[in-house]
Image: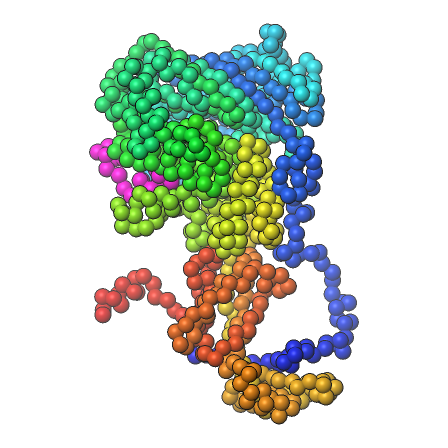
Amino acid sequence: MKIIKLNFLLFSFIFFQLPLCAQTSNQSLTSRGHTNKNKFKQLKEELATPNSYRTASGAPGRDYYQQKVDYVMDIELDDKNKRVYGEEMITYTNNSPDELSYLWLQLDQNIRKKNSPALLKNTEGEGATSNINDLIKENEVNRFASKYLKEKFDGGFNISFVKDESGNHLNYTINMTMMRIDLPKPIKTGEQLKFSIKWWYNINNHVENRARSGYEYFPKDDNRLYVIAQFFPRLAVYNDVEGWQNHQFWGNGEFALNFGDYEVNIKVPADHILDATGVLQNPKEVLSKEQYRRYKFAQTQTESPVFIVNQIEAEENEKGFSSKKKVWKFKAYNVRDFAFATSRKFIWEMMAVPIGGKNIMAVSMYPKEGNPLWEEFSTKAVVQALKTYSKYTFNYPYPKAVSVHSKNQGMEYPMICWNPGRPDIDGEYSLSVKYRMIYVIIHEIGHNFFPMIVNSDERQWGWMDEGINSFVQYLTEQEFGRKYLHLMDGFPGFPSSSGEPSQIVRYMSGDQNIIAPIMSNPENVYQLGPNAYDKPATALNILRETVMGRDLFDYAFKTYAQRWMFKHPTPADFFRTMEDASAVDLDWFWRGWFYTTDYVDIGVKEVKKLTFTDQPTGKAKEILENYQYLLDRYDLVFLSESPIEEEEMNLGVANSKSLNKIINDNSFNLPKNIYQVTFNKPGGLVMPVLVDYHFSDGSVQRVNYPAEVWRKNDDEVSKLITTNKELLRVELDPDEMTADIDKENNTWPKTNEMSEFDQFKAKINN
């Protein structure tokens, strides 16, 4: 074993350190000063100053307010012409302390106008412009052709009128995806304003342009499946943080919305099956007698789903094409948005989930093309999400959660969401398709908690809903795996795509030119998935498992969720609450993980072996000549390499009689071996140092040094190990709990691990 040899002067056994006051300090006077760059510096400069709206503890303040916006809407879906027609009456309640002379509304469909700047700006996401690489990607040729060879789709809102309660026209200005309504007189604090808007727009094919909403066309049976959202002009948020949140919708940054009550009537073809945000008000009118019987029966069934419409019935509906219309009526209270899905292709199932003394309906809607996968797993995933999220946050307060099959991607709205996962045409599917379907359903159902209830500003802080939600998604997936998959697939856990520290290593060790801090606007990052979803989810998992511990973390996290349910939190509110409810100073963690692109790389720099000696040396004498008075007051004991080789390289001991007495006195229990282990931190990110010390008798000592070991030296720290055993091996982060990007410097002595291929060859040769 190679041990780096270095002699070391130990304090006396009363730990008296040799004074350094004799040294000159003139050298320090020639150095330039610097600002506080310590990574444990408090985060106060980065966070907004606490006030009466948002407290220093992270809780809403005594003057916290939020606006309330209620909608009454009549909507018609024109299946033949692929259009949505709508008229809404909006009631805006000004709870702010400010008079408002104008209102800002969001017109998100305008991203699909022919002249939308987003079509020129984006290279990915909704409204994106394809590039030449699209031609070589799998399944991208059709998308490329649809954008450049077909007639360009013209979407966006067509506003027929904006009127006040008396029917007088209101002046308005449309700027891209935002509309300003100029008011005849300001709305004072506590006042309400009622006004109406009439509009229509062309529905896009969301499969071709990967949009959040639209229709999918099924040429085999000439049907469409509609998932409709962002379909009405919606009020922007006005709050204490930035006034009007009227940032334009460019495609990646999602939504900032107000809570309110909704009453929505939706007219669709009579043979359609429809579900939406809220509670269906007229089930007897829109369902057959048998469907209504099943619908009522399902409200109490907690063991397995009840089919309101089964596959045979759905396939029969596909042939109908009724010219008649039905109106489905919904009411929803205290929600921030509204969406619906409708098609004659839908299979419709539901079951009750007991949560908080109430039965919550877990619902799935999907075409036959989703089976057998959806019938097997969709509602199970909804149920697990509702249970696990409720455990870690608050009891789910809404009456239902609906999972709707959509080919392309997941997307979330209050009580309803779209999810992918489609078998091959013959009904076969891979494990990856199955797992992706399950984790997307869990993720999108989880969005009911973040941000539909804990209502963060998605337009500005994508990680606050996506990252936090992805973290609880990880916890949910593991519970789902333990309950449903360990017997079927031969492993005990769910193969989560994010959450485990090792899974973020590739991103964090990537090209710094295309990595942004988590605290970035979603429009300004190169890799939105790793940045806003995976990295914050991993950070929170590490915070729970490695830094805080589960009990402290879970209490603080639940405190945050319950403080801010049905309110609008900011990042500062989250950071402060997590510290306030746990008594753990986490400013160093937020700064490193969320405000920088530093990465974790902690290594074992060197190991030195030290032993006691009573042999005086030249170096020791030279040192002690300057501190002669110490010899008269203390018995000094020194450390040296063993065995001693060269006098000038070793420190000795003054007063060998005292040393002999100590060595021969068993009550002192002097260790046979003393090791100095030095750790360094090439990656820059402050983290706890998790170490396994392996000894000659086969024992292993695990020590978890807190992150605070770096507080006075950001480059390297040393620790003494005293033992009667021989230290054989030092191993850092043995369970891969810190997202360390370089494992080659994690062990001493260094080991050359064989690749999987080399291990395979060795096994064959043996």
Residue 284 in the image: state x and y as whole percent: 35, 14
Residue 475: x and y, percent? Answer: 42, 45
Residue 335 can be seen in this image: yes
Q: Nearer the viewer, residue 641 or 545?
A: 545
Look at the image and say whether residue 425 sits in the magenta stretch.
yes
| Magenta segment boundaries in residue numbering | 422-440
* Left or right relative to 130: residue 189: right
Tell me which residue sits at (65%, 91%) in the image.
655
Residue 135 x, y percent position in the rendering = 36, 37
Is 609 located above or below residue 347 in the figure? below
Answer whether residue 729 is magenta in the image.
no
Above or below 679: residue 400: above
Q: Residue at x 51, y 32 (%)?
A: 453
Q: Is residue 294 left or right of residue 463?
A: left
Q: Is residue 26 above or below residue 243?
A: below
Residue at the image position 60 percent from the left and 10 percent from the top: 165
**Quadrant position of residue 387:** top left
Q: Nearer the viewer, residue 253 or 559?
A: 559
Residue at 46%, 28% (x, y): give it. 398
